[in-house]
Amino acid sequence: MYRITSQRKYIVEAIKSLGHSTINEIADELDENGVSMALSTIYRSLESLEKQNIVRKVATKYGQDFYEMFDQPRHDHFVCSRCHKILDIPKENAEFEVKIIDGNLIRSSETLYYGLCKDCFKHH
Ligand SMILES: [Zn+2]
Ligand SMILES: [Zn+2]
């Protein structure tokens, strides 16, 4: 197993309590918990947590990256095009079937939906 440094442990705790979170939200959460870290440190830690499949990054077309815990049931994401909030969308099929398309081995799939969230839809 990988050794998780205490810095990374704090970051993991922040993501667990925030759910989907941007690097700035993680930094704010760490500040509130009295463990301030430079954004560059957080960024580097997130990169290695991602490589270790502890954290997953969800990139949206708005140039905002969200981080969430890797170890959770498969789900897709929805991003609101107005307020840029990100939400989990349950998968229609809980199991992914590994398949071969054009000779390529497909192991997973992720869908990112765009539109208006409940709140923005009400007020649009
Ligand atoms: Zn919205
Ligand atoms: Zn999610």
Image: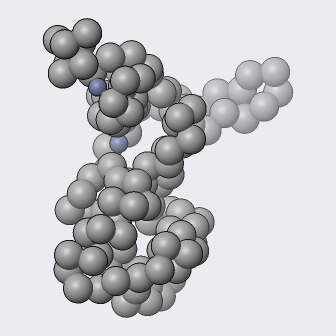
Q: Vertically, is 98 above or below 64? A: above
- Can you tell me which quadrant of the image ligand 2 is in? top left
Q: Nearer the viewer, residue 115 or 4?
A: 115
Residue 78 visible in the shown view:
no
**The C terminus lies in quadrant:** top left
Q: Position of residue 61 (x, y in %)?
A: 57, 32
Q: Position of residue 106 (x, y in %)?
A: 66, 33
- Left or right of 6: which side holds 100? right
Q: Which of 94 and 59 is in front in this view?
A: 59
Q: Vertically, is 51 above or below 95? A: below
Residue 59 visible in the shown view:
yes
- Left or right of 81: which side holds 110? right
Image quadrant of residue 37?
bottom left
Image quadrant of residue 40?
bottom right
- Left or right of 96: which side holds 123? left
Q: Which residue lies furthest to the right in this view?
A: 103
Q: Nearer the viewer, residue 32 or 93?
A: 32
Q: Where is residue 2 in the image (x, y as percent from the top left)?
A: 50, 83
Residue at image position (27%, 53%) is 19
Residue at image position (49%, 73%) is 39
Q: Exactly how many numbered labels are in the figure?
A: 0
- Left or right of 123: which side holds 10? right
Residue at image position (32%, 43%) is 73
Q: Where is residue 90 in the image (x, y as percent from the top left)?
A: 30, 28
Residue at image position (61%, 38%) is 107
